[in-house]
Image (spheres, helix red, strand yellow):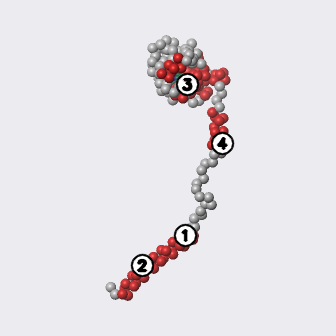
Amino acid sequence: MDSFEFNKIAGAVLGTLLFAMGLGIVADVIFKPKLPIVAGYDLPSAEAAPAKAAAAAPAAAVAPIAERLASADAKKGEAGAKACASCHAFEKGGANKIGPALYGVADRPKGSVAGFNYSAALKDRAAKGEKWDAASLDAFIANPKQYMPGTSMGYAGLADPARRADVVSYLQSLK
Ligand code: HEC
């Protein structure tokens, strides 16, 4: 390889490097990033949270059970109670199943069915002398584990307040 050949190769390499550098500078000028005036990211502001809570509040406001019972339908409740029937007997003299027999449960002392092995949580309520009034039935059926942490009732809960009132109305009719 003579020196002329070498010069040509070196020139080509240098030229390529120069071109790449120039391209970088030109690109920087064209695509100049807009830097924020204040460094960092915008965090959700504190005002957003109460606004959300306020929006959720009307949905959470459920009419008291006494009010809902006035327009409840025990017949619809009987259909709704099908979801309970795998664990509970509703007929008079019905046997305990996975859960205690529920005939006459309304206004009955909690945890009072003979021969049923209640959870410690429910025995605790029984020891306090609590009864299954409409409000506690409503709250228990809405979310058993929330109303009574530690209960052995493996039922997720019935969220719809009107359908729950129907079920409570049905339970009250079992006497
Ligand atoms: C997967 C089974 C299961 C389902 C489904 C179920 N329960 Fe229960 N239920 C239980 C068990 C178990 C207990 C006992 C809970 C304890 O000892 O903590 C119980 C207890 C109760 C009690 C308390 C009774 C007492 O003597 O103190 C009521 C009331 C009740 N269930 C109502 C219902 C209703 C109404 C439904 C349907 C909406 C329902 N349950 C669905 C298993 C179930």
- The kind of secondary structure element at disc 2 is helix
Give the mark nearer the N terminus: 3 vs 2.
Answer: 2
Identify which amino acid the numbered label 4 is placed on: Ala
- The kind of secondary structure element at disc 4 is helix
- The kind of secondary structure element at disc 1 is helix
Can you give x and y, in whole percent of width and height, for residue 103 in the image? Answer: 53, 15
Residue at (42, 80) in percent of width and height: 12
- The kind of secondary structure element at disc 3 is helix
Q: Are marks 3 and 4 in contact (CB under 8 Å)?
A: no
Question: For the residue with label 3, is its CB less than 8 Å from the closest atom of ligand 1?
Answer: yes
Can you give x and y, in whole percent of width and height, for residue 42 in the image? Answer: 60, 53
Q: Rounded to the nearest whole Å, what is the CA distance between mark 3 and mark 4?
A: 30 Å
Task: State the image quarter where residue 33 is shown.
Answer: bottom right
Residue under circle 4? 51
Q: Is residue 119 left or right of residue 50?
A: left
Residue at (45, 14) in percent of width and height: 115
Residue under circle 1? 28
Residue at (65, 25) in percent of width and height: 64
Identify which amino acid the numbered label 2 is placed on: Val
Residue under circle 2? 13
Residue at (58, 15) in percent of width and height: 107
Quadrant containing the N terminus is bottom left
Q: Residues within 10 Å of mark 4 (few under 14, many from 20)?
A: few
Give the mark nearer the N terminus: 4 vs 2.
Answer: 2
Q: Residues within 10 Å of mark 3 (few under 14, many from 20)?
A: many
Give the mark nearer the N terminus: 1 vs 4.
Answer: 1
Q: Nearer the viewer, residue 79 or 157?
A: 157
Determine if residue 91 is in view: no
Can you give x and y, in whole percent of width and height, for residue 86 in the image? Answer: 47, 23
Identify which amino acid the numbered label 3 is placed on: Phe
Looking at the image, which residue sits at the far left? 1
Can you give x and y, in whole percent of width and height, for residue 65 in the image? Answer: 63, 24
